[in-house]
Amino acid sequence: MRGTRPRLVAVALGLMAVAVLAAPDGLPFGESSAPPERLVLPDPPDLL
């Protein structure tokens, strides 16, 4: 089982990257100060 530790490290880094990308203000999910309305994605602005 030589490749277990690098795989666990890769999975941990991937989960941290997903958590950082999912939290816009860089806070953990439970400590986010954003109101619930902000979590809903707004309509994309018209680019034309």
Image (tube, grey):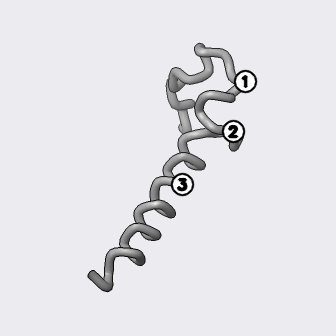
Residue at x 53% of width, y 56% of height: 17
Q: Quadrant of the N terminus?
A: bottom left
Please state the horizontal and vertical placement of residue 46, each as a whole percent of the image: 54, 32
Label 2 neighbour load within 10 Å: few <14, some 14-19, many 20+ = some
Label 1 neighbour load within 10 Å: few <14, some 14-19, many 20+ = few
Earlier-in-chain disc, 1 versus 3:
3
Q: Which mark is residue 27?
A: 2
Q: Residue furthest bottom?
A: 2
| Tag 2 near tag 3, CB within 8 Å | no
Q: Nearer the viewer, residue 31 or 34?
A: 31
Please state the horizontal and vertical placement of residue 36, each as a whole percent of the image: 59, 15
Earlier-in-chain disc, 2 versus 3:
3
Q: Which mark is residue 33?
A: 1
Q: Residue furthest front?
A: 1
Given the image, on which type of amino acid does mark 1 rest?
Answer: Ser
Mark 2 and mark 3: Cα distance apart in space: 12 Å
Residue at x 62% of width, y 21% of height: 38
Residue at x 69% of width, y 39% of height: 27
Given the image, on which type of amino acid does mark 2 rest?
Answer: Leu
Earlier-in-chain disc, 2 versus 1:
2
Q: Quadrant of the C terminus?
A: top right
Mark 1 and mark 3: Cα distance apart in space: 19 Å
In the displayed structure, does residue 18 sit left or right of residue 37?
left
Q: Please name the residue that numbered disc 3 is placed on.
A: 16
Please state the horizontal and vertical placement of residue 23, each as a whole percent of the image: 60, 39
| Tag 2 near tag 1, CB within 8 Å | yes
| Tag 1 near tag 3, CB within 8 Å | no
Disc 1 on helix, strand or loop? Answer: loop
From what the image shows, is residue 19 above or below residue 7?
A: above
Please state the horizontal and vertical placement of residue 6, each as a whole percent of the image: 41, 77
Disc 3 on helix, strand or loop? Answer: helix
